[in-house]
Amino acid sequence: MSSLRHRVLPPQLLLRWPKAASYCLWLLHPEPSSRPSVSDVLQSEFLVEPKDKLEEREAAIQLRERIEEQDLLLEFLLLIQQREQEAADKLQDTVSLLCSDIEEVMKHQSVQGNNGSTAAEKGKEDLMSSELLLMNPSQTDDCLGLGSRKRCRPGCQTQNAEEFDDNMEDGQNSSIMPSQAQGSLLFKNSRLMKNFKKLEAAYLLTRCRPVATVRPLGRSVSRHSPVSSDGRGSVVASERSSISGLQPRAQHVVARQTGWISPFLEGLCKYLSLSKLKVKADVKQGDLLNSSNLVCSLSFDRDGEFFAAAGVNKKIKVFECDAIINKNRDIQYPVVEMASRSKLSSICWNSYIKSQIASSNFEGVVQVWDASRGQVVTEMREHEKRVWSIDFSSVDPTLLASGSDDGSVKLWSINQGVSIGTIKTKANVCCVQFPLDSSRSLAFGSADHRVYYYDLRNSRVPLCTLVGHSKTVSYVKFVDSTTIVSASTDNTLKLWDLSACASRVIDAPLHSFTGHMNVKNFVGLSVADGYIATGSETNEVVIYHKAFPMPALSYKFNTTDPVSGHEMDDTSQFISSVCWRGQSSTLVAANSTGNIKILEMV
C-alpha cells in the first residue's frame, strides 16, 4: 500500500499492461482535481470495451443458438419429408398393386364370362337342334340348313367379347357401374365395414408377402400337392382348372399372377357368410361322483355319428351326436362309458375302424379300445412319463403316434402292440399329428417353442423346423397336405406353409392369429374346411378362417347359478377342448367344468 501511495506500481504490471498502469497512475494523481471524475471512469475504454465485447459475445451466442434451432427445425422437417416420402412410395406401390389386381380380377371375370357365354350358346344350340328334330321331315332340311347357317355366324358372340375387351382397355367406364353396385353391397354389409381395416390389412399382408420358391417335401407331398385328400387343391391347380381355354404356358402364367384370388375370395366369402355360433345342444352329464370333470380331449368317429369325451375323471364317454341334438333331455347319458386307471390326456378315433379309439393317460400308457365292447384291446407301456397326445394315421389305420413328457415321439403298430420307431428330442413333446394324405410324415410341437416336421423314412433329423412361437407349442393340426397350424401358450396360432421351405428352418409364418387368450392351459385346436377352432381362457370358443388373422366368430360359455338360474361369468373357467364334426359347420366344445356344447356356425 505504501508503494501505491507513492505511485510506485509493480514492475510486472508496467511490463504486461502499460495502458492499465497509466490509468492507475491517473487515478492516483496527487492532485485531486487532476484525477478523473466518475463520468470519466464510466466512459473510459477500460469499462466500455469489455461491455462491448460482452454484448458482442452475447449476440454471437444468441446467433449460434438461433442457427442451432434452425438446424434442428431443418432436420425435423427433413425427417418428416423422408417418412412422408416413404409413406408416399409405399402408398404408390399399394395403389399400383391394387390397379394390377383390379385388372387381373377383371380379366379373370372376362375369361369366366367368355367360358360361361360359350357354354350358354352351346346349350341354346343343343336345345334348338332337339326342337328341330321334332319337326316334320319336309321342314327339317330347310330348318337344319337355316340352323347351320345360324351356327356359321360365330362372329356375333366373338364380336361382343371383343367389344367388351375393347371397353375394358379403352377406359374404366365399363367398370364404374359394377363398382358402384358392389360398393353399395359393401356398405350394406355391416360385418364387412366393421372389420374393413382388418380385412384390408389381411389383403395387403397376403399380397405383399414375398413369393417363396416352392420345393416338394418328399415324394408324398409332391405326389399329393396338386389336390389334397379332402378335395382342396393347391392354388395353381384350382386356377388351372378354371381357365381351361388357355395354352399350358399361358395357364401357368395366369395361375401364378392370380394365385391369390381364389384363397382370398374364398376366405372373404366364408368370413362374411357367417354371423354367429348357435348352440344346437347342451350335453348335461349326470356324473355327480366326480368333483373334477375337466374334459381334456374330444374326438368324432369316421362318420361323425358319435363323439367321445375324456379327461381327468378317468372315463371315456361316447355320445350319439344326432340323438343329443334331436332329444332335449335334462341329462344326457353316454351310449358307451369306458373306465381308465389314470387321468386321460388325449383320445383319437380310428378313421377306418369305426369302433376303435386310442387313448393316452397321465401315467404314460397308450391304450386302444373297442368301443363296441367297451374293452381295452391293446395296452402299450413304453413311455416313461405322461403322454400328452396321440394320433392315428388317416392313410394307415394300424399306425399310431404318441408324444410324451419324456421327450420322445413313438410310432406304434397296433397289430403288434409295440413301438416300431422312436424320435428323441430334448424337450417335452406336447402334440403329434399325421398329415391328411401320408403316413410317411409327422409333425409335433414341443416345449422348446418349436414345431418339428419329420420324414419318417429318415427320422434322425427333422425335414424342417418351424420357429416363431415364444412359449410352449400345445397343438399342431394339418389344414391340408402342405399347410399346418400350430397353437401356443403365447396367445397366438400360427399358419405355416411347408412347401415354401427353402431350408431346414421356417421362421416366417403365413399368418399369426390373435384374438383369443391362452397363456397357461391347453385349450384345444381343430381344423375343418379352412376354419380353425380354438378355445380361450376367457371361456370362449373362437373361430378363425385360414385367410384372415382375426376371429370370424366366437361363443362364450356361461355358468348357470343353481339357485337363481341366472347366467354368471366365472373367470376361472376356460375352454379345454374343441372338435369339428368332419368337414361340417358343427363342432363340439367343452370347458374346464365338463360343460359340453354342440355348436353350429350360422
Image (cartoon, helix red, strand yellow):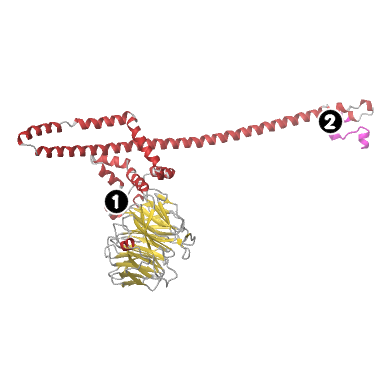
Extreme-right residue of the structure: 31
Identify the mark nearer the N-term, 2 or 1: 2
Residue 286 position, x and y percent, is: 39, 69
Front residue of 417/102: it is 102
Q: Is residue 23 magenta?
A: yes
469 is higher (above) or lower (below) than 194: below
Label 1 crowd (10 A; few <14 / some 14-19 / many >=20): some
Of the pair 202 and 254, the residue shown nearer to us: 202
- Residue at 93% x, 34% y: name it: 5
Q: Can you identify the residue that label 2 sits on?
A: 20
Please say if the residues under marks 2 and 1 sit with CB atoms less than 8 Å apart: no
Residue at the far front: name it. Answer: 564
Mark drawn on residue 467: none
Give the mark count: 2
What residue is rendered at 25% in x and 32% in y? 161
| Residue at image location 30% in from the left, 48% down from the top | 234
Describe the element under mark 1 as helix, strand or loop. loop
Q: Is residue 24 above or below residue 486?
A: above
Magenta segment? 1-25
- Per the image, is 267 magenta? no
Relative to residue 334, is residue 56 drawn left or right? right
**Which residue was labeled with disc 1?**
232
For the residue marked with disc 1, what is the amino acid? Answer: Arg
Tell me how far mark 2 sits from mark 1, CA to CA.
102 Å
Q: Residue 218, image x and y in percent?
A: 30, 54
Residue 375, image quadrant: bottom left
Choose between 501 and 107: the one closer to the eye: 107
- Hey, which quadrant is residue 198 in on the image? top left
Residue 407 seen by the camera: no
Identify residue type, mark 2: Ala
Quadrant in the picture for residue 37: top right
Residue 143 lies left or right of residue 402; in this view the side is left
